[in-house]
Image (cartoon, helix red, strand yellow):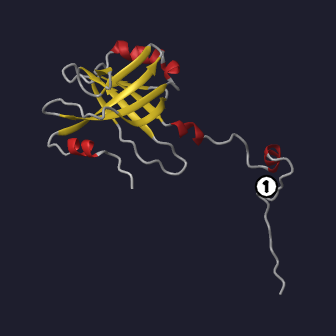
Amino acid sequence: MATQFSEAELEFLRRPHIARAWFADIDLPSGRWRLHNGVGRKTVGGQEWRGVSDPGGGQLVSIGAVEDPRFGQAAKIDIVLAGVNVAFLRSVKDQGRQIEGRLADVYWCAFDQETQEVWPSGLKTMFPGFLSSPKISWSGIGSRTVLLTIESLWHSQNYPFGGKWTPADQRARFPGDKGLDYVGVKVQEIIRA
């Protein structure tokens, strides 16, 4: 059985104070944004990533769990930005249609909290996906949030085909098919022995 981590990675992960950080590479209308869920700027994998959390300024980021999808459902990640300012809220509202469908890849990386050492393997791809239309909510003057959903490639495959379950629609899809001719017809079976 193949292992997910090498021996060097496992040795790093067994340290006493290892944490993970989330990274998102998002293609926005204003350009490519490389963000992480912490504070400040970090260089990982040869790229500079900007932190979007600012506990002192009141802006926090929540990243939802990626759950195994059920049948007929695609996986997604919800990212909530809380405490955003009015200018950012307006920019998201103005560019909502342009944001939808753009590339967004989510990575994770382990690091040692004591030494701030990033593990040698760099970023691990967690979830390649696409942005959905952002959702904005606010309450009064103090509570403003933006919800971004990163959907998997298969999310758009969850839509119905757009037809009706009638004999005419079935023949339009598959000429000569009589599979739906008796849908909705009461059938009475008489058994003779």
Identity of the amino acid at label 1?
Leu
Pick whichever, 144 or 8, lies toward us: 8
**Coordinates of residue 183 in the picture (x, y in percent):** 77, 57
| 32 vs 162: above or below | above
Q: Nearer the viewer, residue 147 or 155?
A: 155
**For the residue labelled by badge 1, is the local secondary structure a helix, a strand or a loop?**
loop
Residue drawn 32% across the image and 22% down it: 46
> Relative to residue 183, is residue 152 drawn left or right?
left
> Which residue occupies the extreme bottom position in the image?
193
Q: Quadrant of the N terminus?
A: bottom left
The residue located at (49%, 29%) in the rendering is 132
Q: Is residue 68 above or below residue 182?
A: above
User: Where does the image place residue 24, in percent across and percent down from the top left?
Assistant: 37, 28
Quarter of the rendering occupied by the C terminus: bottom right
Q: In which image quadrant can residue 33 be found?
A: top left
Disc 1 target residue: 180
Residue occupying the point 21% across, 44% down: 11
Reply above or below: 13 against 129: below
Camera-side residue of 83 and 153 = 153
